[in-house]
């Protein structure tokens, strides 16, 4: 089967989709377009630096380019370098797999005070995303709002000792920031009761390996439901863990009502609880309460007018998959299942028009990083990393562009 | 030797490894590769050697594609006493308590229904220094050698 497919976003959803499409139809031309000069999106900039095993999934994605023939067009921002309409005219099918990266806000008075930060902002900076803002001073008493896996990731990284970061790809600046954070206590709060918290039990159990903390779980409650009981069991295994200097406290059933501050900076968070109001003092508030779409694609309008939003069919020849379709829920394998289902639908509906130019649309455009360019970046990053690190990321777009184009002669 | 590789996968990593093992063994053997999700445990063939490749997911559980197989096994209770298998597990020691829980469970299930396990269960650690295929190829060769010796099957 012939045909030309452009996938916007070279993160896990886009890569899984390309993998599925090319497995079923090896003759397809599948192009992965990304605003960053490097592929793999959330695996590189969202999966925690100390979860290198999870990142091993990029070995599958590398094969999509190396063996299955997908092409990478990095440093191409839809809306800036090419429009969605241009892509739809050039390809037989266009798939939006751009994920969700913008931190949801608390939406309570005071959520704009200095010292209130989204988890994505912090983790992007920790993982050296080239567009990240600087890492801020959290003070000695950060408070995390949210009970999903992102919140647990953030908690774990803030709680780790320098030695516990061996084997990661955490860069020197974030490493220094963590080592010098001066954090004494970390409070993590959830709106739901503990039994219905969103984290995976295995993520909580992992905290039992931390050596620099003392963990306390306040009033987790009980449940007869098997899934809820698993979550409570996981919390029970970490309650009382450790004798370290950093005090980690899990709190549940707290709904944020107002961020309190002095001189424009956060000093406390007031919550409503079933028992009345409660105020917890803190030096910063880290919100891990989900993500929304970046503004470069009209996601909400596209989903609202979709012919079959549930299946990811937006309009003729236009599709969506992964977090971009479903919202910021589900793990990497959930997005694999999603991509496999969408691949079947695209192949079913695809009408190849040989007159469409496909990737020829990009001929002669400068600044595009291809897969070979990424391989040069990858090799640079992984050749002789510092002691205790498996990779030293190139942290700027200019640096990536320079390395990607090294040794390339323009014809 | 007729070899059937069956994989249980969640992220696709076990599927990729299974395909790699197939490619590695194909020159010398008659090798097929199938998802456990598409495998009927009552239709296993005693003339084949089964190489199982299985990951772990969630809280030490079987990966999604192995779950229908395990469920079919529980309900059909096939007699697998004529079946020989070996198993290679994928896991991540970052989650130490549940490390390689999926393949352990699958091996126990096979043995509980009478299947004969060849060799020890090998566990790859995604957080360790080895590439899975660097452990899996020698594992497969050793298993095949042992079966050929034990059963006198010509290579």
Image: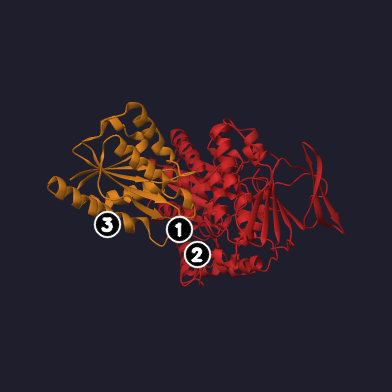
Chain colours: A red, B orange
Secondary element under disc 2, as helix, strand or loop, is loop
- Return the residue at label 3: B138
Asked if disc 2 and disc 1 are in contact, CB closer than 8 Å, the reply is yes
- Return the residue at label 1: B127
Is B123 in front, or is A381?
B123
Query: Is there one chain holding both mark 3 and mark 1?
Result: yes
Which residue lies most toward the top here?
Answer: B76
Q: How far apart are the two marked residues, 3 and 1, measured between alpha carbons?
A: 20 Å
How far across and down, in percent of the image, does residue A43 sit? Answer: 53, 54
Asked if disc 2 and disc 3 are in contact, CB closer than 8 Å, the reply is no
Q: How far apart are the two marked residues, 2 and 3, measured between alpha carbons?
A: 26 Å
Asked whether residue A129 appears in the rendered view, the answer is: no
In the visual, does A351 lie left or right of A81? Answer: left
Chain ID at mark 1: B
How far across and down, in percent of the image, does residue A321 sit? Answer: 54, 41
Query: Which numbered circle lies on residue A100?
Result: none
Q: How far apart are the two marked residues, 2 and 1, measured between alpha carbons?
A: 9 Å
How far across and down, in percent of the image, does residue A343 sit? Answer: 46, 39
> Is disc 3 surrounded by few (<14), some (14 to 19) or many (20+) residues within 10 Å?
few
- Return the residue at label 2: A167
Which residue lies most toward the right here?
Answer: A263
> Is disc 2 surrounded by few (<14), some (14 to 19) or many (20+) residues within 10 Å?
some
């Amino acid at each position: 089967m012939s045909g030309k497919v452009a996938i916007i976003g070279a993160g896990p959803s886009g890569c899984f989709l390309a993998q599925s499409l090319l497995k079923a139809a090896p003759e397809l031309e599948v192009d992965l377009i990304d605003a960053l000069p490097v592929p793999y999106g959330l695996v590189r900039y969202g999966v925690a630096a100390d979860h290198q095993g999870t990142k091993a999934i990029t070995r599958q994605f590398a094969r999509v380019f190396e063996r299955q023939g997908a092409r990478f067009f990095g440093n191409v921002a839809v809306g800036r370098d090419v429009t969605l309409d241009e892509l739809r005219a050039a390809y037989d099918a266009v798939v939006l797999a751009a994920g969700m990266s913008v931190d949801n806000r608390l939406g309570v008075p005071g959520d704009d005070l200095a010292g209130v930060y989204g988890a994505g902002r912090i983790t992007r900076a920790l993982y050296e995303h080239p567009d990240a803002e600087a890492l801020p001073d959290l003070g000695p008493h950060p408070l995390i709002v949210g009970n999903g896996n992102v919140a647990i990731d953030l908690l774990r990284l803030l709680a780790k000792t320098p030695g516990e970061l061996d084997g990661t790809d955490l860069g020197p600046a974030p490493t220094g920031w963590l080592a010098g954070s001066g954090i004494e206590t970390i409070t993590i709060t959830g709106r739901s009761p503990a039994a219905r918290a969103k984290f995976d039990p295995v993520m909580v159990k992992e905290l039992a390996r931390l050596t620099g903390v003392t963990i306390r779980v306040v009033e987790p409650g009980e449940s007869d439901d098997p899934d809820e009981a698993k979550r409570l069991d996981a919390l029970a295994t970490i309650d009382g863990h450790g004798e370290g200097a950093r005090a980690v406290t899990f709190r549940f059933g707290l709904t944020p009502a107002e961020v309190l501050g002095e001189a424009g900076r956060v000093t406390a968070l007031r919550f409503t609880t079933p028992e009345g109001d409660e105020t917890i003092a803190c030096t910063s508030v880290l919100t891990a309460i989900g993500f929304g779409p970046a503004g470069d694609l009209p996601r909400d309008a596209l989903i609202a007018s979709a012919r079959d939003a549930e299946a990811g069919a937006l309009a003729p020849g236009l599709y969506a998959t992964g977090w971009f379709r479903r919202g910021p829920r589900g793990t990497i394998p959930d997005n694999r299942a999603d991509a496999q289902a969408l691949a079947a639908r695209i192949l079913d509906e695809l009408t190849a028009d040989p007159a469409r130019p496909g990737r020829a649309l990009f001929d002669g455009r400068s600044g595009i990083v291809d897969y070979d360019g990424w391989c040069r970046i990858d090799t640079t990053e992984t050749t002789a990393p510092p002691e205790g690190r498996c990779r030293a990321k190139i942290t700027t777009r200019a640096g990536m562009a320079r390395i990607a184009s090294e040794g390339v002669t323009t014809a | 030797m007729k070899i059937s590789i069956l994989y249980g996968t969640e992220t696709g990593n076990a599927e990729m490894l299974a395909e790699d093992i197939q490619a590695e063994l194909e020159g010398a053997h008659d090798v097929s590769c199938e998802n456990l999700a598409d495998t009927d445990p009552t239709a296993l063939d005693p003339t084949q050697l089964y190489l199982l490749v299985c990951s772990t997911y969630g809280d030490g559980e079987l990966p999604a594609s192995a779950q229908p197989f395990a469920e079919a096994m529980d309900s059909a209770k096939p007699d697998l006493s004529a079946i020989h298998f070996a198993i290679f597990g994928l896991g991540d020691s970052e989650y130490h308590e549940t490390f390689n829980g999926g393949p352990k469970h699958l091996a126990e299930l096979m043995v509980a229904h009478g299947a004969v396990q060849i060799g020890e269960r090998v566990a790859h650690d995604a957080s360790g220094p080895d590439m899975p295929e660097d452990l899996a190829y020698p594992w497969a060769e050793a298993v095949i050698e042992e079966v050929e010796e034990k059963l006198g099957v010509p290579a």
